[in-house]
């Protein structure tokens, strides 16, 4: 089942779009099964759960093409230290304060951590994420350029939780517009294309997200079934 879904999804992805298998609340054995099917990127949303699985699955990080952990949930500043030594990408940076803490822990670990700014574009009230205006103001401030432990690598967004596909599409479209404007304004002169990820799309809306230019889709339920604990 797990292997079948992974193959079904990856076969449908255009070149340049990668699948993050969201394994939160699923046991390490399910991750092993996905890894055996060729999946390498895994997303978790709780620091301590990720830390436990990182230890349980340490052998997979030593494979020729290793497992890579992405953090996708709300991250409390006091938990950053658990994941900073190994996390590959943090999708869910929702405040300047969090980014500063990630920077501190990255430097402590001797790393540069790739981070996405989480953009709030959905209809629902949410405590988390920058509005497009706040994110633009933050980029304008230039503060992030002093953070040697951080590589700003793009934008993450979630669409409104609705059956209205036009609304979902317009949420993703706004995120994409922000991403492109920010990239062209702040990252055009960097010699390598480092601001290049647009993380959008979950089980119920990833087809629309891919249509709207997503480069990373984050899928849990379709691969692993209902979450178990
Ligand atoms: C849980 C989660 C997902 C996966 O959602 P599914 O609907 O199970 O595919 C994707 N992104 C984030 C931020 C999540 O928390």
Image (spheres, grey):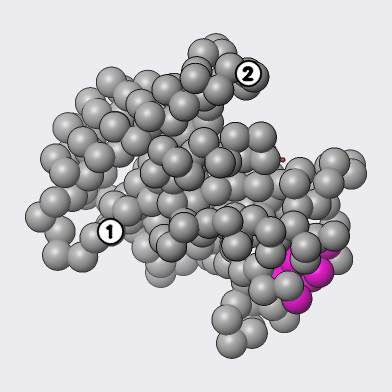
Label 1 Cα neighbours within 10 Å, binned few <14 / some 14-19 / many ≥20: some
* Residue 65 visible from this viewpoint: yes
Disc 1 target residue: 194
Ligand 1's quadrant: top right
Q: Determine whether, in the image, residue 193 is placed left or right of residue 23.
A: left
Label 2 Cα neighbours within 10 Å, binned few <14 / some 14-19 / many ≥20: few
Give the vertical position of 35 relative to 53 (above or below): below
Measuring 85% from the left and 60% from the top, which residue is drawn there? 1
Frontmost of labels 1 and 2 is 2
Looking at the rendered structure, the secondary structure element under dot 2 is loop
Measuring 49% from the left and 51% from the top, which residue is drawn there? 216
Give the vertical position of 17 relative to 92 (above or below): below
Majority secondary structure in the magenta region = helix
Disc 2 target residue: 162
Task: Report the Cα–Cα distance between label 1 and label 2.
Answer: 33 Å
First to last magenta residue range: 30-36
Where, by quadrant of the figure, is residue 139 drawn? top left
Q: Determine whether, in the image, residue 139 is placed left or right of residue 44.
A: left
* Residue 57 visible from this viewpoint: no
Do the residues under discs 1 and 2 have CB atoms within 8 angstroms? no
Residue nearest the observer in this picture, 180 or 93: 180
């Amino acid at each position: 089942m797990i292997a079948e879904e992974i193959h079904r999804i990856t076969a449908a992805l255009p070149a340049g779009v990668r699948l993050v298998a969201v394994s939160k609340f699923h046991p390490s054995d399910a991750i092993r099964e996905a890894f055996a099917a060729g999946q390498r990127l895994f997303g978790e949303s709780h620091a301590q759960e990720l830390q436990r699985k990182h230890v349980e699955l340490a052998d997979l990080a030593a494979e020729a093409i290793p497992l890579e952990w992405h953090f996708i949930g709300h991250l409390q500043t006091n938990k950053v230290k658990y994941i900073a030594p190994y996390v590959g990408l943090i999708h869910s940076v929702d405040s300047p304060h969090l980014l500063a803490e990630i920077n501190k822990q990255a430097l402590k670990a001797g790393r540069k951590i790739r981070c996405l700014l989480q953009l709030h574009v959905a209809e629902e009230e949410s405590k988390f994420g920058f509005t497009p205006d706040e994110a633009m103001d933050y980029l304008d401030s230039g503060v992030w350029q002093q953070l040697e432990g951080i590589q700003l690598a793009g934008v993450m967004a979630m669409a409104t939780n609705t059956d209205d596909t036009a609304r979902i599409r317009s949420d993703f479209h706004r995120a994409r517009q922000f991403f492109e404007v920010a990239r062209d304004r702040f990252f055009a002169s960097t010699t390598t294309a480092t601001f290049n990820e647009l993380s959008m799309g979950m089980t119920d809306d990833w087809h629309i997200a891919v249509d709207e230019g997503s480069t990373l889709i984050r899928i849990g339920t379709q691969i692993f079934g209902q979450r178990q604990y």
